Image (spheres, rainbow, N blue to C red):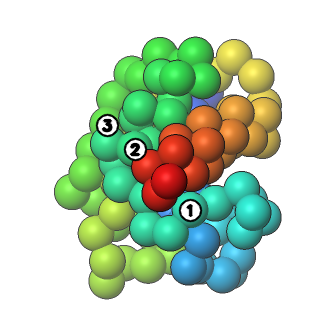
Amino acid sequence: MKDYEHVVIWLDYFNKTLPRDKGRKLEKEKCVFDPSLKELTEAAQAAGFEITETDEKVRFPRRPYVRSGYIILPKGTTKTNILNKISEKLVSKRAKQTK
């Protein structure tokens, strides 16, 4: 049954190596190479979101041959705004790690 109170955020939304038709939701400048579930949860928490649930042993529907992961957040704003806030934290954290 569909849950209208929460939003699912998949790792593949932020994967720079994927084309849009395979699941990437944002521009390449707002994505990182092969994000991990740990990075995604830390970025979501840094952006001020409370994570309800996570799962790392699932497969994204557009890539059923690769294990992925997702987090579930309570819906407070639009999904696009949520993705942009998480992406900002994810990219800045990855930039700090490479320096």
Between the residue at mark 1 and the residue at mark 2, the CA separation in whole angstroms equals 10 Å
Q: What residue type is disc 3 on? A: Thr
Visible residue check, residue 8: no
**Looking at the rendered structure, which numbered label has been put on residue 54?**
3
Nearer to me, 9 or 16: 16
Q: Position of residue 84 (x, y in %)?
A: 74, 41
Estimate how packed mark 2 is, as few (under 14), some (14 to 19) or many (20 or more) residues with alpha carbons within 10 Å. Answer: some
Mark 1 and mark 2 lie on one chain; the one further toward the N terminus is 1
How many marks are shown on the rendered structure? 3
Estimate how packed mark 1 is, as few (under 14), some (14 to 19) or many (20 or more) residues with alpha carbons within 10 Å. Answer: some
* Image quadrant assignment for residue 76: top right
Mark 3, secondary structure of its residue:
strand
Q: Position of residue 83 (x, y in %)?
A: 68, 42
Nearer to me, 93 or 28: 93
Mark 2 and mark 3 lie on one chain; the one further toward the N terminus is 2
**Residue position for label 2:** 39
Q: Residue at x 51, y 30 (%)?
A: 44
Mark 1, secondary structure of its residue:
loop
Q: Is residue 59 left or right of residue 97?
A: left
Nearer to me, 4 or 65: 65
Is residue 90 depicted above or below 78 in this figure?
A: below
Mark 1 and mark 3 lie on one chain; the one further toward the N terminus is 1
Between the residue at mark 2 and the residue at mark 3, the CA separation in whole angstroms equals 12 Å
Assess whether mark 2 and mark 1 are in contact (beta carbons under 8 angstroms): yes
**Residue position for label 1:** 32
Q: Is residue 17 left or right of residue 68?
A: right
Mark 2, secondary structure of its residue:
helix
